[in-house]
Image (cartoon, rainbow, N blue to C red):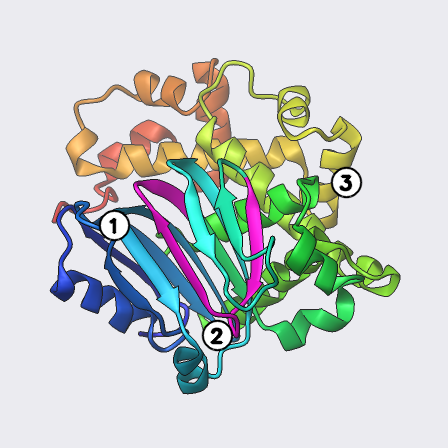
Amino acid sequence: MTAGGFHRLAFAEAGPNETGKLLEALEPSIRFFMDRHNDERMAFDFSLRVMPDAYVSFQWMLGMTNSRQKSHAVLDGNDDLCLLIHRGGQPIQMRLPDRRHGQDEVVLGPGKPHLRCNQERYKAWSLGSNSQVICVSRAHVAHAISDLDHALYRGVPQSAALDLLCSYAKTLASDIGPLDSGTLLQARKTLTDLFILALGPTQDAAETTKDSARAAKLARIKADIEANLAHPELSLGWISGRHGLSPRAIRDLFYAAGTNFTDHVLAQRLERAHGLLSAPTLGHRSITAIAYECGFGDLSWFNQAFRRRYAMTPSDLRASGLAEPSV
């Protein structure tokens, strides 16, 4: 597996060959055993991205048992801290034989996080659940967490920092394409800082991780904007309400990145319109329809903004032959 590459394996009917492919994909990072749970049908849809000393995954699993033994830890030397978050479906049941009685059996319901160290033995199974896994190097975070033992044995509380971590990790575990080495290192740093914030940072760590928190908040807001470019209520106030931030706080996030909210929304709308106008398969769509689809309510304003950005009107683009050739 290439570090930083996105990998997805999905099988509606999984047997030894299919689980073997998944284990092979995971092997550079971690080893464990997978098997059918009782006589249940076994299936999975697994997405994974590996970074230096960290990895994230998002998965749906049905009728599967996963287990990790001391022999696996000896083989791979992985002592990462691993955060498992249940995202829906049936409960995830876990046994952790290295923990004292009363903490050795866990049942995870929707939204509930569970933290373990990959040096611990465990067995987990579910009759059909969605979940995500976030693993970071223990050596990179242990010194910055105020009470790691409490997080391991008493649980990770729900918080805005945890939501931010989960959102960022889900994006990394999606098909956003390969990441170069520099982007990978930055992604790992941001993920690690958010992990520290979610588990409870020391006073010094709370200060040093602020930049990563701001970057993750901005990325989350930008993704929300991109998903809602045509929404009639898209505005600074609307976005601030969705993210629980004041309009001023959102303005400050964009200013710190060298832009502003209004310019970013306009740029995203123009970029989408350019892509749609360039698509050979959409030549039958009118310019007006595309403008409205991208969130422009005024065709005259759309034409002016498009010409300023691309030095041509939407009609010029279609007439110039610059549209992307069909494949």
Image quarter of residue 280: top left
Does 175 appear in magenta?
no
Q: CA distance from mark 1 to mark 2?
A: 29 Å
Residue 19 percent location from the top left of the image: 21, 63
Residue bearing mark 2: 181
Callout 3: SS: helix
Query: Magenta part of the protein: which range?
Result: 112-131
Residue bearing mark 1: 44
Residue drawn at 61 percent across, 42 percent down: 163
- The type of residue carrying mark 1 is Phe
- Of mark 1 and mark 3, the one earlier in the sequence is 1
Callout 2: SS: helix
Quick one: quadrant of the N terminus? Answer: bottom left
| In this view, the mark in front (1 or 3) | 1
- The type of residue carrying mark 2 is Ser
Residue bearing mark 3: 252
- Of mark 3 and mark 2, the one earlier in the sequence is 2
Q: What secondary structure predominates along the stretch shown in magenta?
A: strand
